């Protein structure tokens, strides 16, 4: 059974929170605070930003997916199901 996109994104947030160096990069890039991580953990748009961040680097995607026994495309599929995921990317 496939997990819902928001559940997978919440797992990604939890994994990110456990990666001190990477979490610092995420917080610096997004301006999110520790309070934001807790307060917005159920916000689909915030969770989408977590997936957007992780999807910037294949190594991050693979590390998360390996840690959770998921196929490499799991994050991309979850991102497509969250707000803005169906929007065209012009880059």
Image (spheres, rainbow, N blue to C red):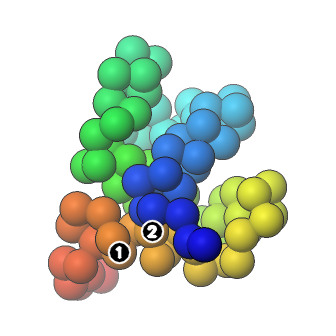
Residue pictured at 41% horizontal, 41% vertical: 29
- Decide: is 36 above or below 47: above
- Residue 7 image label: none
- Residue 78 image label: 2
Left/right placement of residue 79 relative to residue 45 reads right
Q: Quadrant of residue 41?
A: top left
- Decide: is 57 above or below 37: below
Residue pictured at 38% horizontal, 47% vertical: 47
Residue pictured at 33% horizontal, 71% vertical: 81
Q: Quadrant of the C terminus?
A: bottom left
In the displayed image of the protein, which residue is found farthest to the top? Answer: 35
| Secondary structure of the residue carrying numbered label 1 | helix
- Decide: is 18 above or below 39: below
Q: Quadrant of the N terminus?
A: bottom right
| Residue 3 rendering spot, x and y as whole percentages | 54, 64
Q: Which residue is mark 1?
A: 80
Which of the pair 34/83 is nearer the observer? 83
Which of the pair 73/53 is nearer the observer? 73
| Residue 58 rendering spot, x and y as whole percentages | 65, 71
Q: Quadrant of residue 64?
A: bottom right
Left/right placement of residue 66 relative to residue 16 reads right
Question: How many tags in the picture?
Answer: 2
Residue pictured at 45% horizontal, 68% vertical: 78
Alpha-carbon span between mark 1 and mark 2: 5 Å
| Secondary structure of the residue carrying numbered label 2 | helix
Dot 2 alpha-carbon crowd within 10 angstroms: few under 14, some 14 to 19, many 20 or more:
some
């Amino acid at each position: 059974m496939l997990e819902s996109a928001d559940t997978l994104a919440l797992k990604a947030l939890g994994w990110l929170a456990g990666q001190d160096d990477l979490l610092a990069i995420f917080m610096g890039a997004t301006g999110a605070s520790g309070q934001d991580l807790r307060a917005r953990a159920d916000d689909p748009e915030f969770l989408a930003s977590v997936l957007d961040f992780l999807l910037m680097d294949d190594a991050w995607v693979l590390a998360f997916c390996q840690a959770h026994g998921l196929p490499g495309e799991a994050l991309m599929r979850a991102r497509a199901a969250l707000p803005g995921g169906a929007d065209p990317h012009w880059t």
